[in-house]
Amino acid sequence: MSDQKAKEHRAKQTVNNLLLSLLATAGMVLVMILIVPRDDSSRIPRIDYIAVASQASESSKHQIVAPVLPKDWWSNQATWLGNPVDAVPRFEVGFVGPKNEYIGLTHAFGVNATWLALTLKDVVLEKKVVHPGSSNTWNTYRSPVVHQPVETRDYIWVSQVGSDAVLLYGTGTEAQFLTLSKNVDAQLEAK
């Protein structure tokens, strides 16, 4: 074998060895991906919003609503804001549905017209809903801009009881809002 042919053979071997090592590395990465266990469960903890609402009611002396949830719904957060910057104390809770729908609930105390106007600044009144047997009226608001994906404050239901207000907002369906608002009404009527 001449020197020239030996050089060509060694050059081809280097390329072949490089390709074989790349294939071996890709194969090992694929095997690692397939054998490493993964936990696809939700990392968001479920919150006992009823306990948080009860504690907030005791400390604030306000009757806070904590409605019964439909089956397969759960709470992902619950917070009492007793001394917020906007001076409207409120209880905020988030609910997650079986298909990752979201409905937030805010129960605000001593609401003034400015706070309510700022909260509803990007939505327009759509209709009023009164559940049979209830004295509460829910004003439903919708964003005039269609967002994709839907934003949390694109759809808002508001019920005012005296100087207090209950707001429902989120990405749930109208049927889900109806169910949750009925549950809120039942609790408000019981007070």
Image (cartoon, helix red, strand yellow):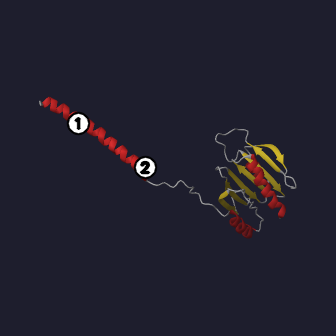
**Residue picked out by circle 1:** 13
At horizontal 27% and vertical 36% (from top left) the residue drawn is 16
Query: Does the image show residue 15?
Result: yes
On residue 191, the disc is none
Q: Name the side, left or right, on which 160 lies relative to 80.
A: right
**Residue picked out by circle 2:** 33
Residue 54, given in percent of the width and then of the height, sits at: 72, 67
Amino acid type indicated by mark 1: Gln
* Quarter of the figure with residue 7: top left
Within 10 Å of disc 1 (Cα), the crowding (few <14, some 14-19, many 20+) is few
Q: Quadrant of the N terminus?
A: top left
At horizontal 70% and vertical 57% (from top left) the residue drawn is 71
* Quarter of the figure with residue 186: bottom right
At horizontal 78% and vertical 54% (from top left) the residue drawn is 181
At horizontal 82% and vertical 54% (from top left) the residue drawn is 160
Give 103 or 99, whichever is nearer the viewer: 99
SS at circle 1: helix
* Quarter of the figure with residue 91: bottom right
Mark 2 in CB contact with mark 1 (< 8 angstroms): no
Amino acid type indicated by mark 2: Ile
